[in-house]
Image (tube, rainbow, N blue to C red):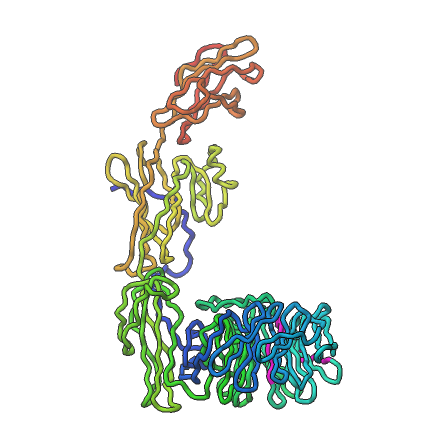
Amino acid sequence: MRRLMPFLVLPALVGAPARAQMPPTSLASPATFSGFNDWLGSDLQGVRVGADGRIRLAPHVRRVAQVPEGVIWCAVPDGSGGFFLSAGTEGRLFHYTGGSVKPLGQVKGGIVFAMARVGQDLVVAPSGEGKLFRVTPGGDVKPFADIDARLVWAMSATGSELTLAAGGERGAVLLLAREGTSRKLAELPEETAFTCMIPDGQGGLYLGTHGRGLVVRYRADRLETLFASGFEEIRALAQRGGDLFVGASTGVANRYASGSLEAREGYLAAPGVQTRGAVFRLDGDGVPATLWQSAQDHVYALALRGDQLLVGTGNRSRLFALPATAGGRDREPFAVLGDVGTGQATALLPAGSDLMVVASNPAELHLLSDTQATAGTLESRILKGAPLADWGRSYLDADIPAGTGVELQFRSGATETPDGSWSPWSPPLRSGERPNLKPSRFAQFRLRLTSSRGGATPAVEGVRVHWANRNLAPMWEGMEIMPPGLVITRTAPPDDIGIERVPLETQKLIPALGYAGAEKRSFRRGAQAFVFRVSDPNGDALAFNIRLMPEQGGPIELARAWRERFFTFDTLPVPDGRYRLEVEASDEPSQPINGAERSTWRTATFTVDHTPPTISEVSALAEGDNLRVRFVARDAASALKEAALSADGEHWLQVAPDDRVFDHAEERFEVVIPRSRVKGDRLVIRAVDQNGNEAAASAPLGEAGRKR
């Protein structure tokens, strides 16, 4: 078997001899779930995740009611253990009492973001109306007062007086309203609106703003800025002793105002560079400290409960618990208490010994108890094969006291979001036991924690999941056969690669006979180049075995384990004829030798032609002031593509055949040119075939030339 050398330019090797290196592999490494961030994409029901990543049973949460709207915008206690609710975008009001939700009424205008109870009635502020309305327990709606504000974000009642945190035409405005009248207490034109409000315990108010995210104090008819958060808005405030807790977010108020809070995220997206939400503490001296921040979660609500600060977030309705004391923060800076299965947890309100969690997308009410749940589950983020995986063993690291338990289960499917086509959950698996799952694109595991002893809980330290991506063969799109003479190399071409005359169509592929991206291009007679269009579904590195396939005779090996996506070889040792290039692509550089996949592509036939055309029947006869030139050009293997005349061998006149088209292996030429264009006594004729081979002949002027 003959072996032809490709055009290669190898860099010099200096120093120690080359050593074999382990190739990269596309086989999946074990996925370890142990740190807090490893669990961010999980669904949590009845379990908590600490800052250290440990999973335990959480306080019990149960859904108590649903509201027939997408979003609950505001909730206030009714004084009898129930709540008044505003929901939807058309000013609809509801009353939660006795464990059920009943329609209360509807007010003219848009969304109701703020309400307050005055006696047995409810005063509401629909957006865009510039009015307050009184709603009786029977649902009758009456005007209460006109106000100079477009949007009221928060409202509190003291007897028959109402304090309103709002946004008006001239910026943030604080209003006082009584039935039939209202007046401005303060304004902050530099901010868009006051967004939240709580008493400061000294006869004044703490206010949050939208715009620059300021915390402002109102006291003695004046405003004082205490803190600039660096976020777009302050969404929630809470106070204990001398500490003020601040919930800040970016990108919430505009969605609120348009009534378009986002639906629950299906699965965690890659975190952006911008932090979405944060919680700060201002001590008695006004010194700020960051307690918590997230690139995934907006802050919607804050509530103090025991020695913890609870944080309601979106868009996965996670409930976070932050220690309210410095000592508690040293022990565990934060924990996730689970989520309620909606898009947002928008309010946290006392409900006896429990805490009412107001949720949206869908609109629901949940009760968070002090009592620990007896069971809870964690469903992991979706595990992805690339593109198909064989699922292996998983190992559970857990502390399981007597009376408690942890179960590990798996399921798999072909869709990124689990649906009815997924497999059912497997029976509980022992640590290290392999699940009986078919190869699939996606999989998920579930932890189920249980306790039959009050207050006792198992603690999961981590889960390690093993799988191997199913290897798929390389995928060919095709191969480009480049024009004859084009040389493609990785490094600079060798010195003997030509300064010969380069055909125009090849010149276009050789920018300045130099760089074209990562490859270098040049020209040399006899070279034949190819560009491979091939990819690997697993992203593996590829190597190529290359053979030349003649129409007659056996294959000729050109290269083995070739790594480039282009290839050039010298055709001069090859006889004229028609050939194909056969290239086998293998992912062996990235795969175990017993798992590598291969696929092969053969080009269309191409011609190797080293034989130049012949030129005959040449004559150049004078006719008055002109010269009539006749000749015939023939080629044995391909059609002709070019002919030219020259009197000095340097300046050439392109000529066309008699039938005007270069489309045959034999072309006849009869050309009349002005005698003045010829400066000597001899004419040179050149003919070129499709493969760049050229021939020349000459004839003295005025007589027939000899055949060449």
In-front residue for pair 596/549: 596
Q: Residue at x 30, y 67 (%)?
A: 423
Residue 25 visible to the viewer: no
Q: Residue at x 32, y 31 (%)?
A: 576
In which quadrant will I find the N terminus?
top left
Residue 489 visible to the viewer: yes
Q: Quadrant of residue 596?
A: bottom left
Position of 708 compared to 125: left or right?
left
Query: Is residue 237 rendered magenta in the image?
Result: yes
Tell me residue 501's x, y (percent): 47, 32
Position of 594 compared to 669: left or right?
left
Relative height, residue 82 to residue 665 (above, below)? below
Tell me residue 571's x, y (percent): 35, 37
Q: Which residues are magenta?
A: 223-238
Q: Residue at x 34, y 35 (%)?
A: 606
In-front residue for pair 668/304: 304
Tell me residue 231's x, y (percent): 61, 72
Decide whether the magenta segment is chiefly helix, strand or loop.
strand
Relative height, residue 252 to residue 591 (above, below)? below
In which quadrant will I find the C terminus?
top left
Query: Is residue 379 rendered magenta in the image?
Result: no
In-front residue for pair 385/700: 385
> What count of labels does the image hold?
0
In-front residue for pair 520/268: 268
Tell me residue 555's x, y (percent): 26, 41
